[in-house]
Image: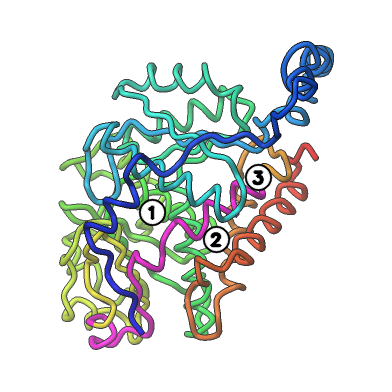
Amino acid sequence: MKPREPQLEDILLLHQGGKTRMVSRVELKTVEQLRQIYTPGVAEISRIIENDPDRYYDYTSAGETVAVVTNGTAVLGLGDVGVRAAMPVMEGKSVVLIDMVDVAAVPILVDTRDADTLVQTVTTFAPTFGAILLEDIAAPLCFEVESRLKETLDVPVFHDDQHGTAVVVLAALISALKISGKRAADLRVVMNGAGAAGSAVARFLLSYGAGDVVLCDRTGAIYEGRREHMNPAKEQIARETNAEHEQGPLAQVMRGKDVFIGVSAGGLVSKDMVRSMAPEPIVFAMANPTPEIWPHEAMEAGALVAEDGRNINNALGFPGIFRGTLDARASRINEEMKIAASTALARQAPEGELVPDFMDRRVHRAVADAVAEAARQSGVARR
């Protein structure tokens, strides 16, 4: 039975007063407990941490807590709505972390579009947390902010719009390859959408071994030497993708391709465009809330498998990624950890399906275990 679409009154009631709050993990019922939790007993813990800073994560909540940081400039499919309108989304992300993998999460709104201010603000409060989750920060600002924070901080920094999306897309693609019998190295991929998610997905697929990826934006194929509507981020991705230097609009570039991945806007792909692809193509149309083409339409046009962003969703990836990162006390989240997450997700998918059930907590635990092991194997784990 198809789930009932949520009604506005239900949504308003659920969000009334916010969705998260900080609660105590210990009881405070007696004066004796007060003296242990607070003064004078807590002074002993402070001395231990002062003398051995590594014990900080043993005796505080920092090692089990993630900051969910946004400036509200690229919120879901809504765009630049500002930090206050972004808060319900950050709270929702926090609920997922708390409920699915028992990671405490604190939404933090940073009301600035300036890279220096954003980096300095996060750097200032970073010691409070075991990891930093960047969310809904528009490109190209997000690239600079993430890069600088990774260089500056000694805790993991992860922009979920980029890397969380990439992890789940690769998981779905691994499952699709199993169904099709094709190899990643043989794939010719076309993507539409050159923002944070598009660039990260393209790079991640190439690092996994995809044959070639052509990235398109509103102007068409991005290629080295293109002059129209370019910026430093697009110039960089142009040097890494489109090996055959293809040019032209999306409809032209899609011809003969094995895979279409959309992270752009609804309704941009027709059935005829899918028919122009290689036989039995793979179609992931993930524009939010309306996909580039509905999966059933892509299937009617000859797609072997087709899915949209409701199921290929980064909520499948980030809970386990952060649980595993914190379990290993990793200093960063590297490519090995992300590929481990994708592989674990694909393994958890039921036969014939592309991705597993988000509500199955065993899925997130499997991802966490794979990520933690990859952190240890790659030398970034501290325990």
Location of residue 210 with respect to 106 vertically, above or below: below
Res. 312 mark: none
> Considering only order in the chain, which callout, 1 or 3, is on the residue closer to the N terminus?
1
Depth check, mark 3 against mark 1: the one in front is 3
Residue 357 in view: yes
Q: Position of residue 278 (x, y in %)?
A: 32, 81
The answer to which image quadrant residue 5 occupies is bottom left
Kindly identify the residue that appears in the image at 39 percent across and 17 percent down. 116
Mark on residue 208? Answer: 2
The amino acid pointed to by label 1 is Thr
2 or 3: tag closer to the N-terminus: 2
Q: CA distance from mark 1 to mark 2?
A: 14 Å
Q: Quadrant of the C terminus?
A: top right
Question: Quadrant location of the N terminus?
Answer: bottom left
Q: Which residue is mark 3?
A: 325
Which residues fall within the magenta stretch? Answer: 297-325
Q: Is residue 63 left or right of residue 74?
A: right
